[in-house]
Image: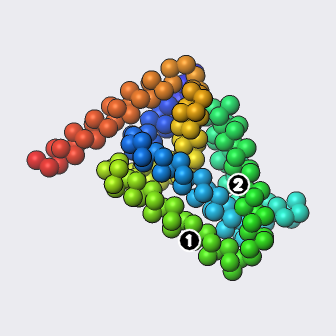
Amino acid sequence: MSKIGLFDLEKHFAFYGAYHSNPVNIFIHMLFVWPILFTALVILYFTPPLVGFSLGSLVLNYGFLFTVIYAAFYVCLDKKAGAFAGFLCFLCWVFGSFLAQHLGYSLAWKVVLASQLFCWTGQFVGHGVFEKRAPALLDNLTQAFLMAPFFVLLEALQMTIGYEPYPGFHARVKAKVDANIKEWKESKQKKKL
């Protein structure tokens, strides 16, 4: 069930979950995380091709490379939800490529910048006002960026259809999240003394 190391979904989910335990903050992240990924892929459309051919409007560039990495990582974490997340990543890449081509660089970067600023601001407000804890990216930038889309997807799947990667997953993760939050609060308390 539980994997070890880089592909330990329980560990990743518990780390990220400890920074996202407030329901309003979770909802804010559900609204803004995937648009951040999508708009990042829009701007990455303008990176040079990694190979000498393209599939019409779809250029095999850094946007494609990141899409493959994200999709493969998610499938390694959990085959079912990971395949769905990978599919969503590829949809973001495809539609992001079409949007980027339609907008052109001079308009696309402005749309991306505005979207990124709006979405990141929303998330920081979620952390500052509702979570009252700094974002996970301040403690582990790579893990936070890589796990954020999968985290919110798993949260949505759990809330809507009761999905668990394996029986007992959510109970085990909740125990780890609660322990992490307790440890964080205690260390915060000690700093005040």
The residue singled out by tag 1 in the image is: 114
Residue 3: x %, y % from top left: 56, 27
Number of numbered tags placed on the structure image: 2
- Image quarter where the N terminus lies is top right
Q: Is residue 96 left or right of residue 173?
A: right
Q: Is residue 6 visible?
A: no
Position of 165 relative to 61 (above/below): above
Q: Residue at x 48, y 27 (%)?
A: 170
Give the mark nearest the N terminus, 1 or 2. 2
Q: Residue at x 50, y 50 (%)?
A: 29
Q: Residue at x 45, y 23 (%)?
A: 171
User: Closest to the observer: 176 or 159?
Assistant: 159
Q: Is residue 38 left or right of residue 122?
A: right
Q: Are marks 1 and 2 in contact (CB under 8 Å)?
A: no
Q: Quadrant of residue 22?
A: top left
Secondary structure at numbered mark 2: helix
Label 2: few (<14), some (14–19) or many (≥20) C-alpha neighbours in 10 Å: many
User: Closest to the observer: 182 or 138?
Assistant: 182
The residue singled out by tag 2 in the image is: 92
Q: Is residue 92 left or right of residue 129?
A: right
> Residue furthest toward the left?
193
Q: Amino acid at mark 2?
A: Cys
Residue 111: x %, y % from top left: 62, 72
Q: Is residue 163 visible?
A: yes
Secondary structure at numbered mark 1: helix
Q: Residue at x 75, y 58 (%)?
A: 95
Q: Amino acid at mark 1?
A: Ala
Residue 133: x %, y % from top left: 33, 50
Position of 183 relative to 66 (above/below): above
Q: CA distance from mark 1 to mark 2?
A: 18 Å
